[in-house]
Image (cartoon, rainbow, N blue to C red):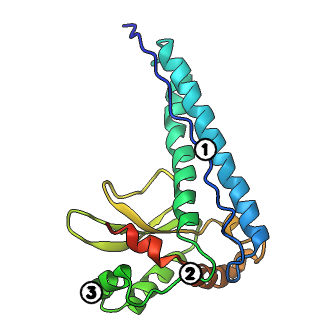
């Protein structure tokens, strides 16, 4: 059955992260390379959504090209959005964790902030590449650290990302060796913008 439609997808613009300079440990060159990769996700997301709209508007919903683009959409869109979460929760020198809303919440749940951080880093040191995300379940108030390998696979339904850590090697191998992930994790923790993280609890 032919379905007439005229759908125009949202066009996403890459966010400006020019203020992320002078991070502890993580070099400006590393960030510049990482931002270029992020821009690629934005570009591919826009191109993919435009192709899908074109096929849908011409009634080709059953076309194999349309279906395969649908399969690919989550990879590109989540690649764009997860990088935005990541860059948004970075700032030179981070900020004050002690006394923040986030610190209060995880201390109440894990027993201490250090216990939450140990859990985060233990998760982030697991073999493989992917993302480590501190999630909030708004229904129960539960906060936990979660491993996600593929951009679009393994996210807990309905959970809100509170802290997003990129542990793909492209996040640190401009200034470190691939085996130096623990050093990168220390650098990441030194630059967490705790104000942004706490705001995500709302």
Residue at image coords 73%, 54%: 36
Determine whether 148 is above or below 121 in the image: above
Q: Is residue 146 left or right of residue 192?
A: left
Q: Are marks 3 and 2 in contact (CB under 8 Å)?
A: no
Q: Residues within 10 Å of mark 3 (few under 14, many from 20)?
A: few
* Kind of element beneath mark 2: loop
**Residue 108 rendering spot, x and y as whole percentages:** 26, 86
How crowded is the residue under tag 1: few (<14 C-alpha within 10 Å), some, or many (20+)?
few
Q: Position of residue 8 (x, y in %)?
A: 50, 24
**Nearer mark to the viewer, of 3 and 2:** 2
Q: Which mark is residue 35?
A: none
Asked whether, in this view, residue 142 is left or right of residue 73, the answer is left
* Pointers 2 and 1 in contact (C-beta within 8 Å): no
Asked whether residue 163 appears in the rendered view, the answer is: yes
Q: Do tag 1 and tag 3 residues touch (Cβ < 8 Å)?
A: no
Residue 130 visible within the image: no
Q: Which residue: 49% across, 33% down?
A: 70
Comparing labels 1 and 3, the label whose residue is closer to the camera: 1
Residue tagged by mark 2? 94
Query: Alpha carbon of mark 2 to alpha carbon of mark 1: how far?
Result: 26 Å
Question: Could you tell me which residue is drawn at 75 percent across and 69 percent down?
Answer: 30
The residue at which mark 3 appears reads as 108
Toward the left, the furthest residue is: 140
Where does label 1 land, which residue?
13
Q: Is 141 on the left or on the right of 120, as rendered?
A: left
Q: Quadrant of residue 3?
A: top left
- As measured in the structure, the alpha-carbon distance from the residue carrying label 1 to the one carrying label 3 is 38 Å
Q: Please tell me which of labels 2 and 1 falls first in the chain.
A: 1
**Residue nearest the observer in this picture, 187 or 23:** 23
SS type, badge 1? loop
């Amino acid at each position: 059955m032919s379905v007439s439609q005229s759908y125009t997808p949202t066009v996403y613009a890459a966010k400006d992260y020019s203020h992320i300079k002078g991070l502890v440990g993580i070099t400006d060159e590393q960030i510049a390379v990482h931002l270029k990769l992020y821009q690629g996700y934005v570009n591919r997301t826009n191109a993919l959504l435009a192709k899908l709209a074109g096929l849908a508007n011409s009634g080709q919903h059953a076309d194999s090209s349309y279906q395969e683009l649908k399969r690919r959409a989550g990879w590109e869109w989540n690649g764009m959005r997860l990088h935005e979460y990541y860059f948004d929760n970075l700032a030179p020198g981070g900020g004050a964790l002690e006394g923040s809303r986030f610190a209060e919440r995880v201390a109440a749940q894990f027993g201490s902030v250090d216990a939450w951080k140990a859990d985060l880093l233990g998760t982030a040191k697991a073999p493989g590449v992917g993302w480590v995300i501190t999630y909030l379940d708004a229904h129960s108030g539960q906060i936990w650290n979660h491993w996600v390998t593929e951009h679009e696979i393994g996210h807990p339904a309905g959970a809100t990302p509170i802290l997003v850590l990129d542990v793909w090697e492209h996040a640190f191998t401009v200034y470190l060796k691939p085996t130096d992930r623990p050093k990168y994790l220390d650098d990441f923790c030194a630059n967490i913008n705790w104000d942004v993280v706490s705001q995500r609890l709302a």
